[in-house]
Image (cartoon, rainbow, N blue to C red):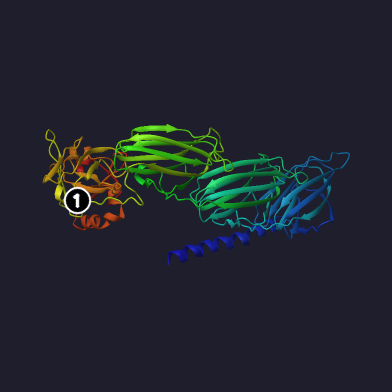
């Protein structure tokens, strides 16, 4: 029902604008229709007089206003039928002894327009006014000024003909890439100065270019290759403002086309960091990667079951690209810059390196340039890792956490006594490496251990004191020949009854539900919705400690002092 009400209000506003604007013009004076090729001659005697002329353009095109006047104190005003001013011009022609002639071209969209001739002197103004019209064929569909009304632009088709007029500052086109690939944007512009911008669906700019010096006699040709991820993009043509009251320059016709070549790559996005790294199997077929203008990095996880030498080989079509290898603790093993790759002559690069068994991360990232247009250093590459003496890896399975809630228990002890994380070994697999992280996203570790099934339990003392008020640590398991599991949040209780001191040391980004506290990331994760809903149902006030350290009453939305909780 709410949606219907909003829609009705919008329509009502639109109808009011349509009715009122022409009425305001008509009330000012008698309107005379000015036909193309005809000339009106008139005298404005009274200082309050003005003459209004109406013209109707059947299509978009260029009008040429021809005016002869005996007095230079006259204003020529042009508005559309919604009352929007298109032109306000002081011709500066004529004097007390002789008349001179003005010839002014103006690019306009199809529609109805009103000329108003106004004098601003006490003398009588004698003038003549005529308009010629030259139509322009276009296939842009108005309105197309925003992303909401963007006109679809068909890839790999004939160029679209657009038109920037005095009353239409922008045309926006929507392009959809079903998979990642390279686009070739080509524009031929008869506009003296125009901006061409490309943004993604979130409004992030991919490029912004000024295309200048175009004219009807010598159109300006511009093109650019851009590598992009799959998705929806908006290509906008915007008039470059001249900064003048008469902003009828920088208008005219253009053609715009986009050719698209898909890239069939093996990247599994997002794979921009270690947490979302894509497994890269040893001794398997090369994978195809792609660095684009809006995806700067790909990260791959390499699991080495045994000590030994590996060889990393890359064939790159990118002019310059950064590659880096790190161990699971974030320590860099090498960082290099393979160069001079191209589509026509790909660059082959390889490097042998001896490594201990464990997990490693190999990243391919764009080398950014100190340029406004950073669409270079993108493209396709292949990547493979070979290793002698290592088990075959067709696919690397992911480790799994024990399903029992008794597998991991946490004792949050008072200051002065070490906190303890206890693991029941029989619920794990011999050789499992268990890692405790401070939060759900960072690489900061609080401790780790390797499970020995000959012992009943394993204990870990976190490297930092756990929060007195309680909270979560995040635990993973890495089994032999498998990749690291996803992080599991393990809740630990508060040390004692909450007091102001406990609340003050709770980390920013905490929600307190009754006598239980959670990180906001954990509470907002849909996987934990049942637990959070139960906590709310079981009662107690809800307070949120925001990321600035302020406690907020969830019911009122007001900031409160911790002593009042």
- Where's residue 153, x and y in %? 60, 56
Closer to us: 406 or 388:
388
Closer to us: 132 or 416:
416
Q: Quadrant of residue 175?
A: bottom right
Q: Quadrant of residue 299?
A: top left
Mark 1, residues whose alpha carbon is within 10 Å: few (<14), some, or many (≥20)? some
Residue at screen point 40% across, 35% down? 352
Q: Is residue 333 above or below residue 299?
A: above
Q: Which residue is mark 1?
A: 514
- Find the residue positioned furthest to the front: 389
- Where's residue 554, x and y in %? 28, 50
Closer to us: 392 or 104:
392
| Viewport quadrant of the N terminus | bottom left
Direction from residue 454 to residue 256 in the image, left or right: right
- Find the residue positioned furthest to the right: 97
- Where's residue 330, x and y in %? 33, 35
Direction from residue 117 to residue 347 in the image, left or right: left
| Viewport quadrant of the C terminus | top left
Instruction: Answer yes or no: is residue 106 visible.
Output: yes
Direction from residue 471 to residue 218 in the image, left or right: right
- Where's residue 41, x and y in %? 85, 52
Q: Quadrant of residue 144?
A: bottom right
Closer to us: 79 or 370:
370
């Amino acid at each position: 029902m709410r949606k219907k009400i909003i829609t009705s209000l919008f329509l009502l506003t639109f109808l009011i604008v349509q009715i009122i604007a022409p009425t305001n013009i008509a009330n000012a004076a008698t309107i005379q229709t000015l036909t193309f090729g005809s000339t009106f001659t008139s005298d404005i005697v009274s200082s309050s007089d003005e003459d209004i002329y109406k013209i109707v353009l059947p299509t978009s095109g260029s009008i040429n206003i021809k005016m002869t006047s005996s007095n230079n104190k006259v204003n020529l005003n042009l508005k559309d039928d919604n009352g929007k001013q298109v032109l306000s011009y002081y011709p500066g022609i004529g004097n007390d002894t002789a008349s001179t002639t003005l010839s002014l071209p103006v690019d306009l969209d199809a529609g109805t327009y009103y000329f108003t001739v106004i004098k601003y002197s006490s003398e009588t103004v004698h003038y003549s006014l005529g308009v010629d019209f030259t139509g322009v064929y276009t296939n842009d569909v108005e309105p197309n000024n925003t992303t909401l009304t963007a006109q679809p632009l068909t890839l790999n088709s004939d160029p679209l003909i657009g038109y920037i007029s005095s009353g239409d500052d922008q045309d926006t086109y929507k392009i959809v890439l079903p998979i990642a690939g390279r686009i070739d944007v080509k524009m031929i512009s008869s506009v003296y100065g125009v901006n061409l911008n490309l943004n993604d669906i979130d409004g992030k700019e991919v490029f912004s270019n000024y295309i200048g010096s175009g004219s009807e006699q010598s159109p300006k040709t511009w093109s650019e290759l851009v590598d992009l991820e799959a998705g929806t993009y908006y290509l906008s043509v915007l008039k470059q403002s001249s900064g003048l009251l008469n902003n009828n320059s920088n208008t005219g016709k253009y053609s715009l086309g986009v050719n698209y070549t898909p890239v069939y790559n093996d990247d599994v996005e997002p794979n921009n960091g270690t947490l979302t790294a894509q497994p890269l199997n040893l001794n398997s077929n090369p994978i195809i990667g792609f660095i684009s203008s809006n995806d700067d990095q790909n990260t791959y996880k390499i699991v080495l079951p045994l000590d030994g030498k590996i060889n990393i080989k890359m064939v790159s079509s990118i002019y310059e690209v950064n590659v880096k290898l790190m161990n699971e603790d974030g320590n860099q093993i090498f960082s290099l810059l393979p160069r001079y790759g191209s589509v026509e002559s790909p660059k082959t690069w390889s490097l042998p390196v001896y490594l201990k068994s464990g997990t490693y991360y190999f990243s391919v990232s764009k080398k950014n340039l100190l340029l406004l247009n950073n669409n270079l250093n993108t493209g396709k590459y292949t990547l493979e890792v070979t290793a002698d003496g290592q088990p075959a890896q067709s696919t690397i399975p992911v480790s799994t956490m024990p399903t029992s809630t008794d597998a991991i228990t946490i004792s949050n002890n008072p200051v002065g006594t070490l906190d303890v994380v206890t693991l029941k070994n029989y619920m794990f697999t011999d050789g499992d490496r268990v890692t405790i992280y401070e939060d759900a996203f960072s690489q900061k570790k609080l401790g780790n251990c390797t499970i020995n099934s000959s012992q009943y339990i394993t204990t870990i003392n976190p490297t930092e004191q756990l929060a007195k008020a309680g909270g979560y640590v995040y635990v993973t398991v890495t089994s032999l020949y498998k990749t690291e599991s996803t992080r599991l949040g393990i809740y630990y209780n508060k040390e004692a009854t909450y007091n102001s001191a406990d609340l003050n040391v709770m980390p920013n980004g905490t929600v307190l539900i009754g006598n239980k506290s959670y990180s906001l990331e954990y509470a907002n994760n849909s996987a934990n919705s049942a637990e959070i809903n139960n906590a709310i149902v079981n009662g107690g006030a809800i307070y949120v400690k925001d990321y600035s350290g302020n406690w907020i009453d969830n019911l009122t939305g007001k900031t409160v002092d911790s002593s009042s909780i």
